[in-house]
Image: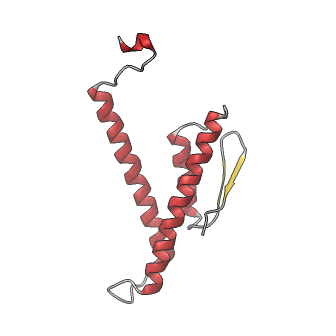
């Protein structure tokens, strides 16, 4: 009866499992996009050495850092728009934005939302 006093009802075990599975899926997808994008940008297609050289290592480090910086900025922007009544659309919208982000190869993010407003974010660094 906790819902009578303004508290949310506790999710069932099935709901908890579904939420955990969705979170694992989201994290796996983000990791795969990060890996693919930074690998294409920083590691040449013709492997010259068995190990990464210093330039490739630095490139991968910066690419991953920018990827996460942009991810955080997009999340903050979507949360602020949702709080302001903009209706940002949840994780489905974020997935579309981050998917386009990987095509830009760690550069500036610029994308259109379904309502045709443009979001432009520059990663720091």
Where residue 8 appears, as percent x and y from the top left, is 41, 21
Q: Which residue is most to the bottom?
A: 48
Residue drawn at (66%, 44%) of the image: 113
Residue 41 seen anywhere in this rendered image of the structure:
yes
Q: Is residue 4 above or below residue 57?
A: above
Q: Which residue is most to the front?
A: 5
Residue drawn at (37%, 47%) of the image: 25
Q: Quadrant of the C terminus?
A: bottom right
- Judge from the rendering whether residue 65 lies leftward or rightward of residue 87; answer left or right: left
All told, the count of numbered labels is 0
The foreground one among 57 and 37 is: 57
What colour scheme does the image use? Answer: secondary structure
Q: Is residue 114 above or below residue 16?
A: below
Q: Which residue is most to the left?
A: 13
Q: Is residue 61 above or below residue 98?
A: below
Residue drawn at (54%, 53%) of the image: 72
- Judge from the rendering whether residue 2 lies leftward or rightward of residue 100; answer left or right: left
Q: Is residue 21 above or below residue 98?
A: above
Residue drawn at (28%, 28%) of the image: 14
- Judge from the rendering whether residue 10 lies leftward or rightward of residue 72; answer left or right: left
Residue 87 seen anywhere in this rendered image of the structure:
no
Where residue 31 appears, as percent x and y from the top left, is 40, 58
Name the image quarter holding residue 104. Answer: bottom right
């Amino acid at each position: 009866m906790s819902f009578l006093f303004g508290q949310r009802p506790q999710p069932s075990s099935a709901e908890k499992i579904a939420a955990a599975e969705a979170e694992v899926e989201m994290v796996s997808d983000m990791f795969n996009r990060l890996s693919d994008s930074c690998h294409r940008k920083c590691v040449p297609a013709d492997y010259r050495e068995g190990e990464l050289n210093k330039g490739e290592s630095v490139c991968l480090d910066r690419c991953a850092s920018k990827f996460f910086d942009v991810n955080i900025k997009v999340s903050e922007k979507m949360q602020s728009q949702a709080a302001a009544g903009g209706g940002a659309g949840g994780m489905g919208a974020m997935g579309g934005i981050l998917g386009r982000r990987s095509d830009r190869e760690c550069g500036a993010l610029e994308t259109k939302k379904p309502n045709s407003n443009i979001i432009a974010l520059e990663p720091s660094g």
